[in-house]
């Protein structure tokens, strides 16, 4: 990661971490979003009924077959395809929720053409938010010797998400994570994040 990517990673990580609850796995992403009074969660079918368009039009409007979000006044909406696999849905929902919580401006339903330049950084941040929310960093360390199957099951994420997450762990291990953690209580979730806060890669 270069400096800018690292900044983006840290920003998304800190926001995801603010949602951390001990022992709450798999993270109840749907109820988390439903409990957020500023966000409305709709399936493609619900959106099609409300907007008065056919269901097949919904993915065209949102430019995604998986999910999209938009803002209307102060309220944010996440519209998702409930026919996708559960692990896929969970990551996508966390990703869209990340866009909202990180105050991203791109990929809005109404002005998506204006802000193409900021797109990829925002996508990177939303993906980082989603993976750090669903599979927190210190849990990756705790589960480092478990099988992908066990991890995917425990956190209800896809195998490809597991492998992306574990690659980041490997990179942090190479950067001296283990040495740092051995000086602190390593189950405590703050010490991993503190390592990154103190580290200048
Ligand atoms: Zn996105």
Image: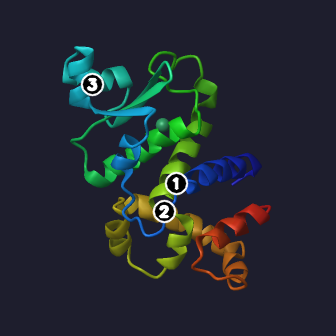
Where is residue 85 drawn, in percent x and y?
25, 50
What kind of element bears circle 2?
A: loop
Mark identifier at residue 19 = 1
Does the closest atom of ligand 1 sit within 8 Å of the Cβ of label 3? Answer: no
- 97 w.r.t. 183: above or below: above
What residue is at 39 percent from the left and 43 percent from the top?
35
Label 2 CA crowd tier, 10 Å (few <14, some 14–19, many 20+): few
Where is residue 86 drawn, in percent x and y?
27, 52
Label 1 CA crowd tier, 10 Å (few <14, some 14–19, many 20+): few
**Image quadrant in which the C terminus is located:** bottom right
Judging from the image, the colouring scheme is rainbow
Residue matched to label 3: 47
Which label's residue is closer to the chain start, 2 or 3?
2
Does the closest atom of ligand 1 sit within 8 Å of the Cβ of label 1? Answer: no
Quick check: 166 left or right of 159?
A: right
Residue matched to label 2: 21
Where is residue 191 drawn, in percent x and y?
67, 72
Q: CA distance from mark 1 to mark 3?
A: 27 Å
Label 3 CA crowd tier, 10 Å (few <14, some 14–19, many 20+): some
In this rendering, the label closer to the viewer, 1 or 3: 1
Q: Evaluate if marks 1 and 2 touch, with contact meaning CB atoms under 8 Å apart.
A: yes
């Amino acid at each position: 990661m270069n400096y800018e990517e690292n900044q983006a990673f840290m920003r998304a990580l800190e926001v995801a971490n603010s949602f951390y609850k001990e022992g709450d796995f798999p993270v109840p992403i749907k109820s988390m979003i439903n409990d957020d009074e500023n966000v409305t969660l709709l399936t493609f079918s619900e959106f099609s009924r409300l907007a008065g368009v056919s269901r097949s039009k919904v993915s065209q409007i949102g430019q995604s077959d998986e999910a999209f979000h938009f803002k209307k006044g102060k309220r944010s909406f996440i519209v998702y395809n409930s026919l996708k696999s559960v692990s896929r849905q969970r990551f996508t929902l966390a990703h869209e929720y990340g866009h909202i919580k990180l105050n991203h401006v791109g990929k809005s339903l109404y002005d998506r053409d204006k802000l193409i330049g900021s797109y990829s950084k925002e996508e990177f941040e939303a993906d980082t938010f989603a993976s750090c929310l669903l599979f927190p960093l210190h849990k990756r360390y705790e589960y480092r010797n478990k099988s992908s199957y066990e991890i995917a099951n425990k956190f209800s994420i896809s195998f490809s998400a597991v492998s992306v997450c574990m690659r980041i762990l490997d990179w942090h291990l190479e950067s001296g994570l283990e040495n740092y953690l051995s000086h602190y209580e390593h189950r405590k979730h703050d010490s991993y994040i503190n390592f990154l806060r103190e580290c200048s890669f």
